Image: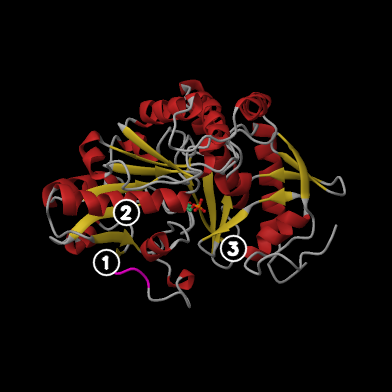
Amino acid sequence: MTDAQSFAACYRHTGRPFVRGVGCELFDDQGNRFLDLGAGVAVSALGHGHPELVATIKKQAENLIHSSNLYDTPAKRSSVEKIAQYTGFDRVFLSNSGAEANEAALKIARRYQQLIKGEKRYRFVCAEKSFHGRTFAALSATGQPKYWEGFGPLLPGFDFVPYGSVEALEAAVTPETAAIFIEPLQGEGGIVVPPEGYLRAAREIADRTGCLLIFDEIQTGIGRTGHFLACHSENVMPDIVTLAKGIAGGLPLGAMAHTETLAAALPPGSHASTFGGNPVACAAACTVMDIVAEESFLASVRDKSSYLKSALRQAVGHLDCVEEVRGAGLLIGVALNQPAKPFVTRLFNAGILTTVAGGNVLRLSPPLVVSKSELDEGVTQVTKALSTPASEE
Ligand SMILES: *Cc1c(COP(=O)(O)O)cnc(C)c1O
């Protein structure tokens, strides 16, 4: 392997490049096997090398790779229909990433308030410790000052409230608020599950005050929590939802879906993306969504979720460094009383891929097709890793 001198310095390198993946296993260029319990940060929903997904991608690449948004393609058409059908929204804008889906959501919210409703609403109420992406508006909505450092000034109009507090939401919404913009479960912030009723309260506040409600389901959507959308489990629908990560099984695709009411805010020419709706990514998304949306598949995610949570609680719940095992579906966090990074590194060296969330949380977000024996292997290794203090090796 050549050294990594040419990479932008914002990425650290492990020096063990992955060359191949099968199911929940990845192999580096030396043939070493890793158990992937991160799925590329909740992306590879069907695991690696899923035969049906690979066949779809091959076939679409042979037929057509790009046509632009000036024209229609069957792949784009059916992915949009499926997103609408499975999420319960009316209209879908396709992007290439999560941050871009959020940009589209923030833009349509302002435009709807200002041009369609004729109100001077431009502010967004967001949550502390949220994560919405790295572009300027998404970054401005991200309630973690460490991500802002050196990038100021950010976009004006973003207000932050503690996540999970209905009173704080209530107090922060003003006649200038265009939308409440939150994750239904905070992913990067540390796998933070809000108190029951929080999402419904946000819906009620938005309805009462005339602002919109946007859910960022980029990490929680597409079956990750054992429901097609996390908000489906509470039966609370926002006006706009954003998706990305798992949607196309690893190909770059994002989506911003919204209700019919908002359609007038995005007439032709008001927003666009050159690559958004790429036929190969869209075809892949159709295959992923058809598999994930099956009730039996979603039920298996919920089943494996309880299995993993109780196994982890039993195995590591009593350890000094462990505060709590939490999360939904296959988005599980082991909250520690110290930084999780050393343990993630230790697990990597033992051939297990996990990620850090919110600094102190060890995140498990395996492919949704993970088996119980693979989860067992994960629990054994996580237990081993957490059983010796971070400073000792
Ligand atoms: C990952 C993530 C994003 C950003 O997605 P990108 O594709 O990296 O732009 C936004 N919101 C949430 C909740 C995420 O988890």
Label 1 residue SS:
loop
Which is more N-terminal, label 1 or label 2? 2
Give the amino acid at mark 3: Asp
- Kindly identify which numbered label has been placed on residue 195: none
- Kindly identify which numbered label has been placed on residue 320: 3
> Is any atom of residue 198 visible in this view?
no
Of all residues, the one furthest to the right in this rendering is 30
- Kindly identify which numbered label has been placed on residue 106: 2
In front: 183, or 345?
A: 183
Q: Residue at coordinates 44% horizontally, 58% vertically from top-left?
A: 131
Of all residues, the one furthest to the front in this rendering is 70
| Colouring used for the render | secondary structure
Side (left or right) of 316 relative to 95: right
Give the amino acid at mark 2: Leu
Residue 203 is a magenta residue: no
Which corner quadrant holds the N terminus? Answer: bottom right
Q: Residue at coordinates 71% horizontally, 41% vertically from top-left?
A: 377
In front: 352, or 4?
A: 4
Label 2 residue SS:
helix
- Tell me how far mark 2 sits from mark 1, CA to CA: 11 Å
